[in-house]
Image: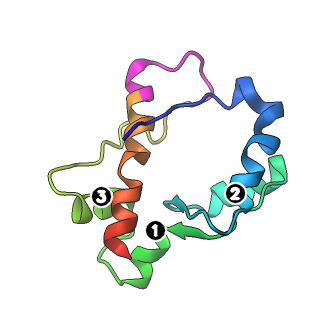
Amino acid sequence: KKDFLIDPFSLWDLIHDSLAPTLANPKVVKVFHGADSDVAWLQRDFGLFVVNMFDTGRAARALKLPSYGFAHVLQRYVQGVQADKTHQLSDWRQRPLPEAMREYAIMDTHYLLDIYRAMK
């Protein structure tokens, strides 16, 4: 497994053409958590539409879990891992991102596919 952290600001003009084929491909499942805002800004800012998406937050609601937050879902489906939410409200516009924020960003998505597989 590899994780990639990509700065969207430096690639802003390339985002639509780079992501559109994958996001619109119904054969590729896109996994998000709490994607409502993400989907809205992808559409608004880039004209991108997400086809065949699985939202672990919505799945948590459908499964009637006690909490729908990422920290709870992560703890429930991935043994021995606790979510670190210390940078959830940090200023993500700053560049370069401090190392702690880069690590947070990677860990915030690292287990999404594991959670998806467990929830299916």
Residue placed under numbered mark 2 in the picture: 23
Residue at 85% across / 53% down in the picture?
A: 47
Gap in angstroms between the C-alphas marked 3 and 1: 11 Å
In the displayed structure image, the side of residue 35 where residue 49 appears, left or right: right
Do the numbered discs 2 and 1 sit on residues whose CB atoms are within 8 Å? no
Residue placed under numbered mark 3 in the picture: 74
Look at the numbered disc 2 and give the secondary structure of its residue: helix
Q: Quadrant of the N terminus?
A: top left
Tag in front: 3 or 2:
2
Residue at 44% across / 27% down in the picture?
A: 102
Name the kind of residue labelled 1 in the image. Gly
N-terminal-most mark, 3 or 2: 2
Residue 8 in the image, given as x and y percentages of width and height: 68, 32
Look at the numbered disc 3 and give the secondary structure of its residue: helix
Gap in angstroms between the C-alphas marked 2 and 1: 19 Å
Residue 55 in the image, given as x and y percentages of width and height: 51, 67
Badge number at residue 107: none
